[in-house]
Image: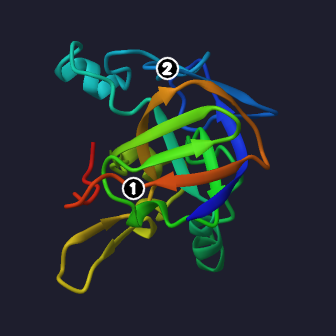
Amino acid sequence: MTGRVISVAADDGHRFSKRVAPAIRLLTGLGVEGDAHCGVTVQHRSRVAADPTAPNLRQVHLVQSELFDELRPRGFDLAPGDLGENVLTRGLDLLALPRGARLSIGATAIVELTGLRNPCAQIANFRKGLLAAVLDRAADGSLVRKAGVMGIVIEGGDIAPGDAISVTLPAEPWQRLERV
């Protein structure tokens, strides 16, 4: 399984969208250098309020650009960084990967997937109807969250648009991604 980086983004403030950059640096055990969500412990404001000592399982936010393709005919013309993602990918079904899958990105960076982004009211505030558009129901009736995946930085490095992404799967049995 391979894919590509389409864009990278970071923001030092707790804003919904992130600024697209020519490259970002991933820091081992911390996240994206200069990003408001970089840190060993939780950095998302709602999570800090609940338990500021909890480990940061949301150091890097990745979204597959195929989601943008899916949403465009429904009236949502999204640009890189709009959903607050650090890495926009193409060619990988991120949502189908198991927890613990490792993404090797560029020359040295490795991100281990920890779970799904839980879409929240900020998405609804960003664009009317977008929250409902990034949620779906599976055949069994379970909720499907399509707003991206979260991960931790196992090995740091610089990443940029055009970088290759390869996947290393964890040992079976696989655990599906749940919201983090």
Q: Residue at x 59, y 38 (%)?
A: 86
Q: CA distance from mark 2 to mark 1?
A: 20 Å
Q: How is the image coloured?
A: rainbow
| Residue found farthest to the bottom | 139
Q: Position of residue 37 (x, y in %)?
A: 47, 23
Q: Position of residue 81 (x, y in %)?
A: 65, 43
Residue depth check, mark 2 versus mark 1: number of the one nearer the observer: 1
Residue 8 sits above or below residue 37 on the image: below
Q: Position of residue 25 (x, y in %)?
A: 66, 23
Residue 39: name its quadrant: top left
Identify the secondary structure beneath mark 2.
loop
Residue 144: name its quadrant: bottom left
Q: Residue at x 55, y 65 (%)?
A: 1
The numbered disc on residue 169 is 1
Circles 2 and 1, Cβ within 8 Å, touching? The answer is no
Work out which quarter of the rendered image holds the C terminus and state it.
top left
Q: In terms of depth relative to the viewer, which is nearer, 106 or 14? A: 106
The numbered disc on residue 28 is 2
Q: Residue at x 33, y 32 (%)?
A: 57
